[in-house]
Amino acid sequence: MRKFDTKVQHLKYKVLREVARLAWNETLLEHVLDIPKMLIPGKESTMRCCVYKERAILGERVRIAMGGDTENPNIIEVIDIACDECPVGGYEVTNACRGCLAHRCEDVCKFGAITFDQNHVAHIDKSKCRECGACAKVCPYTAIISRKRPCQNACKVKAIPMNEEKAAIIDNDKCIQCGACVYQCPFGAIMDKSFMLNTIDILKKSEKNTRGGNYRVYAIVAPSISSQFTYAKLGQVVTGLKKLGFHDVIEAALGADMVAMAEARELSEKGLLTSSCCPAFVRYIKTNFPKLVEHISHNPSPMTVLAKYIKETTPNAKVIFIGPCTAKKAEAQLEDVRPYVDTVLTFEELQALFDSRDIDLSTLEEGVLDNASYYGRIFARSGGLADAAAQAMREQGIDFEMKPVVCDGIEACRMALLKLNKGILDGNFIEGMACISGCIGGAGCLTHGEKSKAEVDKYGHEAYEKTISDAISLL
């Protein structure tokens, strides 16, 4: 049964799975360098110029699966030797150029990058072109087009330039670590660092897996998990987590319920707010709209709120967040979050963990996951946070006219923030989600698409009779 959207994801998963298999037995980790040869045992290459290059790239995937470059603070890394198959890109003249006499493209180019051959056909000098796009706008035949690399198209914050070897590099000052480039790169040349080894180490030494272990490990699972393991039931995923060594599994949606209540109060007091649940959106504000930082909600994300509650009420607890988001890995390393969240896994990594222990979810009994309300669960999709905040106002009797601006994807976030910056925003609460469709569109998801939204809504409706107040009253 197919578990992933793309073959690139499947390749990444196989590396993660084999690293995890070795990590469960520390004495076997010395064989980690054998993984590339094990995954590509023959001598004929299937994707690259030679099998040796394929194995070298797999070696880099193994390195990132084991934590990556510790000197690089970014969660996202580029595998240079895998980034060599895309065209350089930029503006190009196609064969639609008719060699017209007007030469409007030449007239508007301020950099002298347009020349013509003997047939009046235009050519662009890449060394002079600044990719302003003026020539493309005036061409009457639309013969000039922009060919951007998939990673650059995916990165809406323009954090991916090219180095001298024409390989992608990441500008850490601009990158919001959303992982869009990771998911869109057709060659898997961009990956997010994995902290799976930390997770395995925590689980191995826990009370459940080790005689004499003195702590329990709690899994906080994002509500988007309801749309991910399509070959099994959610209750079977819960049981699978406990077989891995987790003491208990708790919905991050319960943290969302807690945040909704607090954020509703904060909005009514301040009159204007931007959400704080999506770490990529928060980072985008801080790097691109520093004057608007004062409007970011002071409430921590659902992950942090719930992890903090667990740590404060349970002695010696360890907390691992599992979700769709690469930016959560960066959030967990922030100074005010690190004490509460021990590490973060994506759904891709969780699938690798299950299979590294030969856990077949479809054969397991169903466990129970029943912590949160409908409103906490729909945080997973675009618009859910705003709906939850409005409901929280109603439940708390807050008399405030909330005018939400729901931003689906970072480009929509940018437009709303630009309007807020200019004082022309028609709204008082910006729900910012960096990924299209919200968390169900995260780079660490196994699957994406409209079906995921339907599954999340279905999951939410299972708790429809429970109010937000009902959910947090059980804490």
Image (cartoon, rainbow, N blue to C red):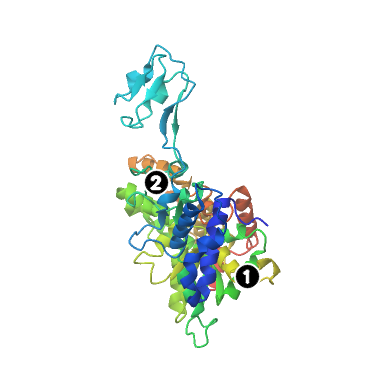
Q: CA distance from mark 2 to mark 1?
A: 36 Å
**In the shown orientation, is residue 383 left or right of residue 100?**
right
**In the shown orientation, is residue 365 left or right of residue 380?**
right
Q: Is residue 103 above or below residue 422?
A: above
- Image quadrant holding the N terminus, namely bottom right
Q: Is residue 184 visible?
A: yes
The tag on residue 358 is 1
Look at mark 2 in the image and give the residue it sits on: 168
Q: Is residue 445 visible?
A: no
Task: Inspect the image, locate mark 1, and give the three-letter code of the amino acid beneath it.
Answer: Asp
**In the shown orientation, is residue 113 left or right of residue 454?**
left
Quadrant position of residue 246: bottom right
Q: Residue at x 50, y 50 (%)?
A: 50
Percent position (x, y) of residue 215? 48, 82
Local packing at callout 2 (Cα closer than 10 Å; few below 14, some 14-19, many 20+) is: many
Question: Foreground residue, 163 or 208?
Answer: 163
Local packing at callout 1 (Cα closer than 10 Å; few below 14, some 14-19, many 20+) is: few
Q: Is residue 332 above or below residue 312?
A: above
Judged from the image, the secondary structure of the residue bearing numbered disc 1 is: loop
Percent position (x, y) of residue 334? 36, 64
In the image, farthest residue toward the top: 101
Question: Foreground residue, 194 or 264?
Answer: 194
Task: Inspect the image, locate mark 2, and give the three-letter code of the amino acid beneath it.
Answer: Ala
Percent position (x, y) of residue 448? 58, 51
Label 2 vs 1, first from the N-terminus: 2
Q: Residue at x 67, y 63 (%)?
A: 232
Question: Foreground residue, 221 or 446?
Answer: 446
Judged from the image, the secondary structure of the residue bearing numbered disc 2 is: loop
Percent position (x, y) of residue 147? 45, 34
Question: Foreground residue, 14 or 212?
Answer: 14
The tag on residue 332 is none
